Every structure is written in structure tokens, then in C-alpha cells.
């Protein structure tokens, strides 16, 4: 998994000068998917990312992924399986930025 280190500005108001940080994730079938990082929160020693696939679609749904392993430049992420953990992290993202409308 590769991380692209670019600058992140406001999600809602992009212009040609704004660049959002992205990561490329390889799924279990070997397909590469680029996700754009909207926000990052830390909770109990864990790192969680709020990401989207399509930065130009205002109605795109965000996904929360959890960093589970770091090996040098390689980072492994996974979806949050535990409903209680997901709800806690979703609430942290919502409290972190009032622009997010998170439905649980």
C-alpha cells in the first residue's frame, strides 16, 4: 500500500491549487483503489482515516478505515468490523468537523 503525500485543504472547496492527500489500496483480488483522505483521527493508540473514492462527486459516500500495520513505507488498512468501535470512531469524525453528516 502506498501513501501519496500531498497537501490537504478544505474538501468542499477545491480549486486548481488545492491537492488532497490520497492513498492507493490493493484489495484482496489485487485491484488497486485510490482513496482520498478527508480526515484522520487517533483513538486509543489507533489511527483511523475517513476516505472517499470520488473526489468530484458531492454525493459520494465516505468510508472509515483503520490502520492495522505499518512496515516501513507500507501501511495496511482494514474496514472496522466491530459495530461499537465503528460508532465511536464515526462520532469522533463528526465531532471533529461539522461539515460531515455521518449516518450510523
Image: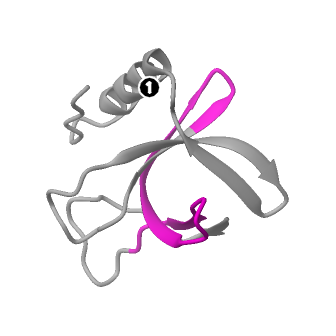
Q: In the rendered picture of this protein, how many numbered marks are placed on residues?
A: 1
> Residue at 75% across / 45% down in the picture?
69
Q: Position of residue 64 (x, y in %)?
A: 43, 41
Question: Which residue is under mark 1?
Answer: 86
Q: Which residues are magenta?
A: 19-47
Location of residue 93 (image quadrant): top left
Res. 9 in view = yes
Left or right: 10 with respect to 92? left
Q: Which residue is at the far right?
A: 72
Res. 7 in view = no
Q: Position of residue 47 (x, y in %)?
A: 61, 37
Residue 52 drawn above or below residue 82: below
Asked whether 39 falls inside the magenta stretch, the response is yes
Q: Residues within 10 Å of mark 1 (few under 14, many from 20)?
A: some
Q: Which residue is at the far left?
A: 59
Residue 34 drawn above or below residue 96: below
> Residue at 61% across / 70% down in the picture?
30
Location of residue 25 (image quadrant): bottom right
Left or right: 36 with respect to 78? left
Amino acid at each position: 500500500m502506498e501513501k501519496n503525500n500531498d497537501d490537504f485543504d478544505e474538501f468542499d472547496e477545491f480549486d486548481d491549487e488545492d491537492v488532497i492527500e490520497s492513498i492507493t489500496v490493493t484489495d484482496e483480488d489485487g485491484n488497486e483503489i485510490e482513496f482520498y483522505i478527508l480526515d484522520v483521527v487517533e483513538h486509543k493508540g489507533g489511527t483511523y482515516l475517513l476516505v472517499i473514492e470520488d473526489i468530484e462527486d458531492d454525493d459520494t459516500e465516505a468510508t472509515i478505515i483503520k490502520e492495522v500495520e505499518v512496515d516501513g513505507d507500507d501501511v495496511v488498512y482494514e474496514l472496522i468490523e466491530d459495530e461499537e468501535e465503528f460508532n465511536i470512531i464515526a462520532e469522533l469524525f463528526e465531532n471533529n468537523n461539522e461539515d460531515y453528516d455521518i449516518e450510523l
